[in-house]
Image (cartoon, helix red, strand yellow):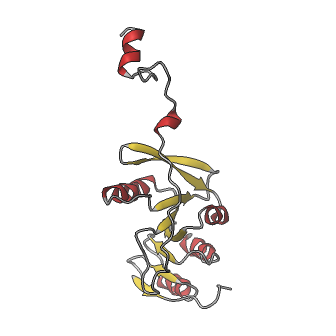
Amino acid sequence: MSPATASTNGTNGANGTGASLSANDNIRRFAAPSRPLSPLPAHALFSDKTRCLVYGLQPRAVQGMLDFDFICKRKTPSVAGIIYTFGGQFVSKMYWGTSETLLPVYQEVQKAVAKHPDADVVVNFASSRSVYQSTMELMEHPQIKTIAIIAEGVPERVSLSTLLCSSFVLLPASSLSLVPFFRSSPPS
């Protein structure tokens, strides 16, 4: 293929006008959605503007959530960021429909919560060995209203002690399933 042909059909980094494309040109960025004017009723856990943080590096699960959001014609992805305590701070490339988007990956819960004040749900993919510690760390932040624990094999004793301090936790199927508790004071 001659260089002239490559520049006219948009391959090899050219868009036909002589200007080259950068990787940044294909990345879709989203502003945080505005919250509803009135607060949600106490019994409502989620709304069409709910945003979450995902605890644990689970790219397939996150991509599935983004795909579902896109198919449902949601304006903004429900996933605001990823918390991965075993790595540094970086971005993870995901797809929003046919365009790319970058999700921030944080090493610390504190940074993730501070950067995304609109995220009030956490989907916790921590292993059954570390799910208790990570859930307790998440509950230190009053912004987090709901935590969904995905880990299997969590002992009932651990599940019960998690519930005693929680605002609302969706427990794994191997435990007690779905039990609401409303926080009256921060965990000690």
In the rendered view, does 139 fall on the left or right side of 4? Answer: right
Would you say residue 176 is visible in this rendering? Answer: no
The image position of residue 181, as x and y in percent, is 50, 89
Q: Residue at x 54, y 67 (%)?
A: 119
Tell me: residue 61, above or below residue 134.
above
Return the residue found at the far left. Answer: 71
Would you say residue 21 is visible in this rendering? Answer: yes
The image position of residue 177, as x and y in percent, is 39, 82
Return the residue found at the far front. Answer: 37
The image position of residue 61, as x and y in percent, is 41, 58
Q: Quadrant of residue 68?
A: bottom left
Q: Total number of numbered labels?
A: 0
Nearest the viewer among 83 and 1 is: 1
Tell me: residue 7, above or below residue 187.
above
Tell me: residue 90, above or below residue 80.
above
Quadrant location of the C terminus in the rendered image? bottom right
Quadrant location of the N terminus in the rendered image? top left
Q: Residue at x 46, y 73 (%)?
A: 148
Q: Residue at x 40, y 69 (%)?
A: 48
Q: Quadrant of residue 187?
A: bottom right
Q: Residue at x 45, y 85 (%)?
A: 41
Nearest the viewer among 27 and 164 is: 27
Nearest the viewer among 48 and 67 is: 48
Return the residue found at the far bottom. Answer: 184
The image position of residue 166, as x and y in percent, is 55, 84
